[in-house]
Image: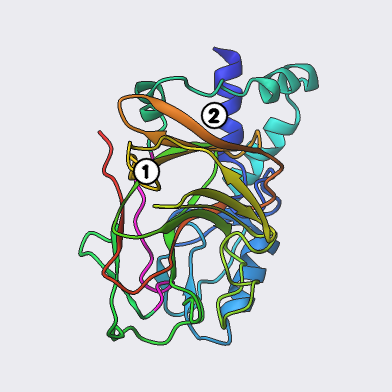
Amino acid sequence: MAQKEIKMDEENISCLSCLDLLKDPVTIPCGHSYCMNCIKSHFDEEDKTGIHSCPQCRTNFMPKPVLEKNIMLAELVEEQKNISPGVAEVDVLLSPPEPKTRAGFLKYSHEISLDPNTANTHLLLSEDKRKATIMRQKQSYSDHPDRFTGWLQVLSRESLTGCCYWEVERRGGGVGVAVAYKNISRAGSSNECKFGFNDKSWSLRYDSNGFQFWHNNVQTVLSGPRSSRVGVYLDHRVGVYLDHRAGILSFYSVSETMTLLHRVQTTFTQPLYAGLRFFYYDNDTAEFIELK
């Protein structure tokens, strides 16, 4: 029980930006807390747009919030630092094992909604912001510095830390199911903006030709369940499991069973955002499935 309480306290007093214990904690109007320097740097970057937002929930603030130290949170951080190092070390090592069944994964289900401010102008988002569809006609989105201008991509509103699981279902051609840091480039058609082609994003592409994993412009060709027809893949749904603290990112083919397609073991240095990337102009759609 003591270890559980320690873990809960540590999560509550960790910065949602750098993921370390809060330093000079600040709570902004939406209720999320950050290190003073982390949120100040974030707001400073947004000064040129005049729009200031929470990195976690994307709530916009006008005018820019005044940053004041949260004394109560600062005291909690100091209490946490005084906990026996031995107990804290044991707690950090206790990362939950990766589930084996879909029911196990669903315990970590995370609802994903798409951020309209990041959507390429050829992507139409559904009213509930869970589905994206390619449109030949440009959508009337307002200009925004977070928007992908050169690639058919969109990111989630929510940042992802801890253990999370979500599923994406595609209809039509190929789609890239990705995660990326918030500071991935947005403007233009360089590899710095393209999911899987830089060190700020990881992407699983799947279509009728198969599965490919991309990171930092390195391709890994994967095997996957096929139908009896050559080149046709049975599964149109992919499950993604993230254990941010352990640095694990796993992609599964979802049907009656969970088939592992690819697993990444790395170190994540920032919160991640779920992403979609499209390749063709023919009304392809991809949807974050509502999991129950």
Q: Which mark is residue 233?
A: 1
Q: Which residue is mark 2?
A: 8
Out of 191 and 95, give the one closest to the viewer.
191
In the rendered image, which quarter is residue 67 located in? bottom right
Rendered location of residue 232, percent (x, y): 35, 46
The residue at 45%/29% (across/down) is 259
Residue 73's place in the image compared with 81, above or below, is: below
User: Quick one: quadrant of the N terminus?
Assistant: top right
Out of 111 and 29, give the one closest to the viewer.
111
Out of 193 and 29, give the one closest to the viewer.
193
Of all residues, the one furthest to the top in this rendering is 1
Rendered location of residue 83, percent (x, y): 73, 24
Q: Of helix, strand and loop, which one carries label 2?
A: helix
* Residue 118, magenta (yes or no): yes
Query: Magenta: predominant secondary structure element?
Result: loop
User: Quick one: quadrant of the C terminus?
Assistant: top left
> Label 1 crowding class (10 Å Cα cut-off): few <14, some 14-19, many 20+?
some
**Amino acid of disc 2:** Met
Residue 196's place in the image compared with 7, above or below, is: below
* Residue 125, magenta (yes or no): no
Is 156 on the left-hand or right-hand side of 128? Answer: right
Disc 1 to disc 2: CB gap under 8 Å: no
The residue at 48%/57% (across/down) is 56
Q: Of helix, strand and loop, which one carries label 1?
A: loop
* The magenta segment: 110-120
